[in-house]
Amino acid sequence: MPLNIPNLLTWARIVLIPLFVGVFYAPETWLTLAQQNLIATAIFIVAAVTDWFDGWLARRLEQTSAFGAFLDPVADKLMVAAALIVLVQLERVDAIIAIIIIGREIAISALREWMAKIGAARSIAVSFVGKIKTTAQMIAVPMLLYRSALLGIDMLWLGTLLINVAAVLTLWSMGYYLQKVWPIISARGVS
């Protein structure tokens, strides 16, 4: 595993996950709910920014690696899954939405791994719908974590709308990926 700045940023995102979750387990004498919401939102935003930044740095500094390409999406999925589970527990996201988003991530990750094993990884490259889904999700989660109104905008309402849009796009993008790989799956059988 090459130790470079992009990989260290990815590891930092993974290290932030227990801190992010732990914020909501801090005693009320340490942090009020509003402070928990604000700190968790800030941690999630820092993680989202480092996600973009580590990829940019890896390309810019020519420090891309197979390990970094593997670890980066794992860190993203772990952070989003942790956030969704916390939001379900806080009753800010319906469990079915979290199941759709997390389930799709697991299914597509497994599909990508299998496609790579059979030498067809390019058939399941990231789609435009997948990018829009990720954008909607990465905007919705901080809004749902923050929860309070900001500049007169009801963050909980807008975040709920966006996470529902993300769930629909999640299903759409999963259908898209399955449609793209179905001919390969059919030709190979289920062995």
Image: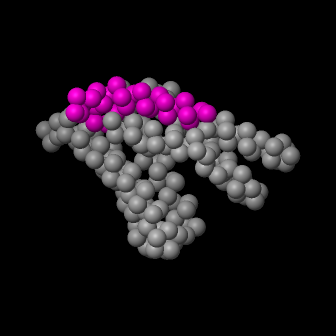
Task: Name the residue rendered at 30%, 31% in the picture.
Answer: 155
> Is residue 32 found inside the magenta-colored segment of the image?
no
Left or right? Give the position of 103 relative to 45.
Answer: right
Left or right? Give the position of 38 relative to 18.
Answer: left
Task: Name the residue rendered at 28%, 36% in the picture.
Answer: 146
Query: Which residue is nearer to you in this view: 125 or 190?
Result: 125
- 148 lies above or below 122: above
Task: Name the residue rendered at 73%, 39% in the picture.
Answer: 179
Q: Position of residue 24 (x, y in %)?
A: 28, 39
Q: Quadrant of residue 13?
A: bottom left
Task: Name the residue rendered at 43%, 31% in the picture.
Answer: 162
> Is residue 158 found inside the magenta-colored segment of the image?
yes
Q: Position of residue 119 (x, y in %)?
A: 75, 59
Q: Quick check: can you spot residue 89?
A: no
Q: Quick check: can you spot residue 9?
A: yes
Q: Magenta region, mostly helix, strand or loop? A: helix
Q: Which residues are magenta?
A: 144-172
Query: Which residue is nearer to you in this view: 51 or 14?
Result: 51
Q: Position of residue 100 (x, y in %)?
A: 54, 32
Q: Position of residue 87 (x, y in %)?
A: 37, 33
